Image (cartoon, grey):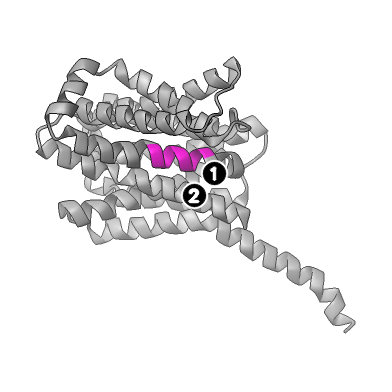
Amino acid sequence: MNLLKYSIFAILGAVSYGTLSTMVKLGFKDGFTSGELIGSQYLIGWVIIAAIYLFSFNYKISWKNAGQLLITGLMTALVGITYAVSVSELPASIAVVFLFQFTWIGVVIESIMTRTWPSKSKLVAILLLVIGTLMAGAIFNQSLSALSMKGVLFGLLAALFFALYMVLSSKVATQEAAPKRLFFISTGAFLTMSLTTNPVHLVTQLTETSLWRYGLLLGVLGVVVPFFLFAISMPKIGAGLGTILCAAELPSAMVVSVIFLGELITPLQWSGMLLIVLGIMAPEIIRRMSFTHQSGKKLLPYNRHG
């Protein structure tokens, strides 16, 4: 039951991430740049988390744990930076396919760290997710020979950084309280993002334009909510299962884009989303089937001798 609860937390965190692309597109329509939108996301998100941490009255942390959590935040900021480059070089539907390779990269990293082969349920899930992502991303409608190698490389780097973020979230400083973990992870992300954004210009835009509205939504749904849910769930479910469950981000992004942007989704893409959902559910379905099968075996001798 606890595994299911923490798995739902991870899925909700991924769904929250899935709303970001639509909000960023709406921000573009209002004349804001990607740097302004993403910068405001991490700035406002950090302010909210810093306030939560301030009122937690639990500030003691070792230098080692603080450093590891800052590096975790660095990884999530690098996802945004590298993915932005990929999107600038590739069609968005193709860039997202490369980003979503984090689903199997996370499982591979976990397997290397634990020196164990991925379970059957994870392998089935990965197969469904990869096929579903290719279909949902409409990659079959694109000319692959014309793809920018720079875009492909940065898309795969984004996938690697996201997988590393999942691994670190599940492994480092897990004994620390959630507000403390959130604060240092968000601080690492904000400091990294501030290197690519002019803080003075950003604050001016936030106070003098409607950027604060986008920053507030992006900060809550792109920093506070997912960071909190991942900080709680990842240490409990592990990076392998965590990266599989985070594939919920793509169906979420597509559904939100249909609702708020009126984007058209082809039958092939809907089919791909269905496969992604099945891939996310596969580990739990296989686990329950295995448990039922094992329970039946244990009960069989008893029933036989009635």
Quadrant position of residue 284: bottom right
Q: Nearer the viewer, residue 143 or 252?
A: 252
Secondary structure category for the residue under label 2: helix
Q: Position of residue 29 (x, y in %)?
A: 10, 39
Q: Which residues are magenta?
A: 224-231
49 in the magenta segment: no
Left or right: residue 306 versus residue 209 is right
- Identity of the residue drawn at 31% across and 27% down: 43
Secondary structure category for the residue under label 1: helix
Q: Tag 1: Cα neighbours inside 10 Å, few (<14), some, or many (≥20)?
A: many
Tell me if I can see residue 152 in this picture.
Answer: no
Q: Which mark is residue 233?
A: 1
Left or right: residue 118 versus residue 245 is right
Marks 1 & 2, CB-CB < 8 Å contact: yes
Magenta portion: prevailing SS class: helix
Tell me if I can see residue 54 in this picture.
Answer: yes
Q: Position of residue 125 (x, y in %)?
A: 51, 52
Identity, as a three-letter code, of the amino acid under mark 1: Ser
Quarter occupied by the N terminus: bottom right
The residue under label 2 is: 9
Q: Position of residue 296 (x, y in %)?
A: 75, 71
Quadrant position of residue 66: top right
Mark 1–mark 2 Cα distance, whole angstroms, equals 6 Å
Quarter occupied by the C terminus: bottom right
Question: Which residue lies most toward the bottom here?
Answer: 306
Vertical order, 42 against 3 (above or below): above
Q: Nearer the viewer, residue 81 or 3?
A: 3
Left or right: residue 97 versus residue 104 is left
Identity, as a three-letter code, of the amino acid under mark 2: Phe
- Identity of the residue drawn at 86% across and 77% down: 302
Number of marks present in the image shown = 2
